[in-house]
Image (cartoon, rainbow, N blue to C red):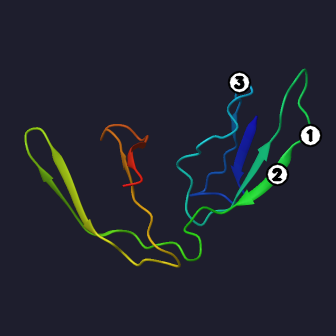
Amino acid sequence: RLVYEPLESVQGVSKVVTVDLRGNSQRWLKVRDLFKGVPYCFHVQAKTNTFGPEIRANVTPGPEEGSPGPPLNPSITETASTLTIHWTPGLLGAGPLKGYVIEAKPSDEGLWDTFVKDI
């Protein structure tokens, strides 16, 4: 079970989200739609017949120190059967740039899916 909640209200709202994961093979969960700069408290606990003790961690989403900057000057070229995305690299940050991740979503939905990664 994973529980997370903002430690301060976001736009006047404070909500708690609980996710129950079934089985024992998945030991990760991608959490979406967190607000940058807002601290969250995450609780994780295992369950057999009952729930065991939980662990807690406070996390504040946002770029880590030394992270690269966002890509610059994005543009899209579209034909009948292709879509080409162009950009220039932003600030490199503390280390060599290892790749980019492109996410996409239908315009009528709020969920982003990884479209291409490690390019």
Q: In this view, does 76 lie to the left or right of 22?
A: left
Q: Residue at x 55, y 63 (%)?
A: 36
Q: Is mark 1 on a helix, strand or loop?
A: loop
Q: Name the residue under label 2.
A: 56
Q: Residues within 10 Å of mark 1 (few under 14, many from 20)?
A: few
Q: How crowded is mark 2: few (under 14 residues within 10 Å), some or many (20 or more)?
A: few
x, y percent for residue 67: 52, 72
Q: Residue at x 55, y 77 (%)?
A: 66
Q: Mark 3 points at which residue?
A: 22
Instruction: Give, as a three-letter code, the residue at label 1.
Output: Pro
- Disc assigned to residue 53: 1
Q: Residue at x 25, y 66 (%)?
A: 87
Task: Say which quarter of the image contains residue 82.
Answer: top left
Examine the rendered structure and indicate whether residue 98 appears above or below residue 17. below
x, y percent for residue 110: 41, 41
**Distance of label 2 from label 3 (alpha carbons):** 20 Å
x, y percent for residue 95: 51, 76
x, y percent for residue 26: 67, 32
Instruction: Give, as a three-letter code, the residue at label 2.
Output: Arg
Q: Earlier in the sequence, mark 1 or mark 3?
A: 3
Instruction: Give, as a three-letter code, the residue at label 3.
Output: Arg
Q: How crowded is mark 3: few (under 14 residues within 10 Å), some or many (20 or more)?
A: few
